[in-house]
Amino acid sequence: MNRIQEFGKEKGIPSANKFWQITGLPRATAFRLWRDRDIYPDRTTVEVICKKLKAQPGDFLIYMEDIDEA
């Protein structure tokens, strides 16, 4: 899962719109990542976020193992 919204707010980014402006990501991508914790960014997007926000992937991504209940 991603914690981009929480991480962004920790960095002083109050909204998806500001996240989009700061990162320069495509608008739809920035808003989708901000609003949906289940979306994982692709490698290029992770690199952009890391560079623009001076972060490591672990700062805004959490690995959740799928639990197969079948």
Image: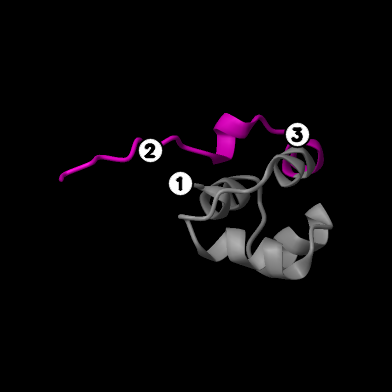
Three-letter amino acid code at the position of disc 2:
Met
> Marks 1/2: CA distance?
7 Å
Stretch in magenta: 49-70
Q: Which residue is mark 3?
A: 54
Q: Which residue is mark 1?
A: 1
Dot 1 falls on a residue whose secondary structure is loop
**N-terminal of the two: label 2 or label 3?**
3
Residue plotted at (66% across, 51% down): 12
Residue plotted at (16% across, 44% down): 69
**N-terminal of the two: label 1 or label 2?**
1
Mark number, residue 9:
none
- Which numbered mark, 3 or 1, is in the foreground of this view? 1
Q: Quadrant of the C terminus?
A: top left
Q: Which residue is mark 2?
A: 64
Residue 64 falls inside the magenta stretch: yes
Three-letter amino acid code at the position of disc 1:
Met
Residue 53 falls inside the magenta stretch: yes
Between 27 and 11, the residue placed more toward the observer is: 27
Disc 1 and disc 2 in contact, CB within 8 angstroms: yes
User: Going by the image, does 7 lie left or right of 50?
Assistant: left
Dot 2 falls on a residue whose secondary structure is loop
